[in-house]
Amino acid sequence: MIIAIASGKGGTGKTTVATSLALSIADKAPLFLDCDVEEPNAALFLRPELDHRQEVGVPIPYIDPDKCTYCGRCAQVCVWHVIAVVGRKVLVFPELCHGCGSCTLNCPEGAISEVLDVRGSLESGRAGPILFAQGTLNVGQAMAVPVIRQLKHKYLPTANGAVAILDSSPGTSCPVVETMRGADFVLLVTEPTPFGLHDLRLAVQVARDELDLPVGVVVNRDGVGYAGVDEYCAAEGLPILLRIPQDRRIAEAISEGKTLVEALPGYRPRFTMLYERIVQAAASWKEAR
Amino acid sequence: MKQLVILSGKGGTGKTSVAAALAHLASQEMRIALADADVDAANLDLVLQPVRLEEHAFMGGQVAIIDPDRCTLCGRCYEVCRFDAVVPGEDCKAYRIDPLACEGCASCIYQCPAGAIHAQEQQAGLWFRSDTRFGPLFHAHLFAGQENSGKLVTMVKQQARLLAHDKGRDLLIVDGPPGIGCPVIAASAGADLALLVAEPTVSGIHDLERILATVNHFRVPAIVCINKADLNPGHTAAIEAFCAAGAIEMVGKLPYDSVVTKAMVQGQPVTAYQSEGLMAAALRRMWVRIGHRLRNGG
C-alpha cells in the first residue's frame, strides 16, 4: 500500500497529515518517504536518526579525447544541448543534462562513458518503528525529479508490502507526478479557501484524470474560509476523509516542530480511522475496475 | 525598470497575498506590471480579477510516439529508456509511451530499428496577457502533470518584461513559486531584489535558509519579511537574529490575521479589502521599506 500525500497549493498541511498518519499506524512499521526534495521538512517532525547517506545525481557524458573524432553526432542527438563540438573541442554543460544516455548510444567511436553528476542526496534511518528516508536537492540545482526517482527506486516497493507514506512537494508539475506515480492512493490536503480550491482542482486533474489513481481529500483549517471546497468535492464525488478544524493551538504546536498527534493526542484515533478509510477507498476503487 | 521577485521556499507562507497587496500599494505611486511565475498553481489572478486580453498556447517539450503498425516488438525502446516511459502495450501488440513519464530525450527514436518512433511537440499549457486595475498581468496555466514549468516561467516573465519596458513601467512584481528548483531559478533570473516570505515555524526557518542560499547562489540580493510573526515570537526572534547576522534587511513582520483569508474569499488584495487595521498598516510600512530599497539599487 503506497499512499502519496499531495496538495497543489503549498502550506495546506501535507507534512502535518503525513507525519501524524505515519505515527498513528506505527504498529504497521510504515515506511515514510519525504519526496519534497526541494524543501524536505518531515524529518523536523519525525526526528529520525539518519545513519545512512548517499549522493545521487544524473549520469553525464565524459568524452574520451583519445577516441573522439569530433564528428558532432553527440551534440546532434542531444535535445537539451548539453554538448557542443567546437572545432577540436567538446564542451559539456552538466547542469542541462537529464542523463538519458542517448549520446553514449549514438557515438560511433564508443568514446563516451558516463560519470555521476551529483544533484542531491538520499538519507535514511529509523524514527522508532517508522523507517524514514528523504531526498534533498542540492542548492542551485534545477531538477528535482532525478532525486525523487532515485529515492523511490531505492526504497520501493517496501519489504513484505509494508505501508509507504510519500510526502509530496506542492504544485502539479513533474516532481508531483513523479511522487504520485505507482501510488495506490493519493490523499490531497486542502484548505477551504479560493487558493486551496483552485489548486485542489489541478491536483485532482493530475492524480485522478491523468494518472488514473483513486483520490481522497483532507480539509485542513476547516471553517476558515468558505464552502467552495465542500461543494466541489460533493459535485466531483471526492470523499472527504478527514477534517482538521482551524485552531491556533495546532498552528502553534506545529510551529514548534510538534506533530499534530503529539500535540493533541485526541487526534490519534482519527488518523487511524483515516488510514482505514484510505484502505477501504482504495479497495473499492480497485473492485470497481 | 526594477524587478522584484517574491519567493519563500516553503509553500503557503503567503507569497501571493503579499504580492497582491504590494501590487495595490505600489500602483498608487508608480507604474507597475505583474507576472505570476507560479505556473503550476497560479493564484494571483484570483485576487486581482484580471480581464483577459490575450491567450496563447505554450508548446512544451516533445514526447515520443510509437506507431503500433510498425512496431516489431523488439523491445529496444524499453531497454534504452531511463525514465520508465516505455510500457508494453496491454494486448502485447506494440509498446507504447507514457507521455507523462517521457522526457522527450529522443533516445528511443534513434535506437528503434524499425523507425517506428517519432517525436511530437506537445502543448503543455497556456499563457495570458491580462489587465488589472493595478497594471498589466502576465500569467499562465501549465497543464496537469506537465514538464518544463521553468520554460513557461521564463516565457511569462519575458513577455511581462517586454511590455513593461515598452510601456515605461517602473516596477515588475513577480509572484514566485515555492521550492528551490527550476521554476524558482527561472523566476529569480534577472531580478533586482528577492522578497523572501518566511514564517516562524521550524519548517519555515529551514526553508528560508535553503531559498536564501539559492538566491545567493544566483546573486540576487534578498530581503525578508515574516508572515504570521506573532504565531511564535521565539522563532520570529530567531529569524530576525539570523537575518541580522547575515546583514539581510528585515522589511516587515505581518500579524497572524484572519483578514487575509477574508480578503481572498472576496477576491481582493488584503490592503484593498481593509485599508485600516494592523495587517494593512504592516504591509504599508513594508512597502515603504521595499520601495526605498528598490530606489537604492536593490
Image (cartoon, coloured by chain):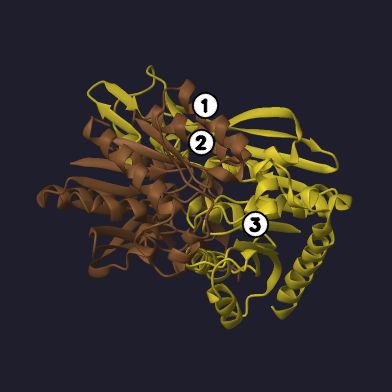
Chain colours: A yellow, B brown
Q: Is residue A263 left or right of residue B289?
A: right
Residue drawn at x 63%, y 75% is A238
* Residue A40 seen in the figure: no
Residue B145: x and y, percent? Answer: 48, 59
Please state which of residues B85 and A211 is positioned toward the viewer in this rendering.
Answer: A211
Residue that carries the numbered disc 3 in the rendered image: A5
Q: Is residue B210 left or right of residue A152?
A: left
Residue that carries the numbered disc 2 in the rendered image: B208
Q: Mark 1 or mark 2: which comes first in sequence?
A: 2
User: Which chain does the residue under circle 2 lie in?
Assistant: B
Residue B259: x and y, percent? Answer: 48, 61
Residue drawn at x 53%, y 48% is B83
* Amino acid type shown at disc 3: Ile
Residue A8: x and y, percent? Answer: 52, 59
Look at the numbered disc 3 and give the secondary structure of its residue: strand
Q: Are marks 3 and 2 on the same chain?
A: no
Q: Is residue B256 left or right of residue A152?
A: left
Which is in the foreground here, disc 3 or disc 1? 1
Q: How far is the residue under mark 3 from the one under mark 1?
A: 32 Å
* Residue B44 seen in the figure: yes
Local crowd size for mark 2, using a 10 Å CA cut-off: few (<14), some (14–19), many (≥20) = many
* Amino acid type shown at disc 2: Leu
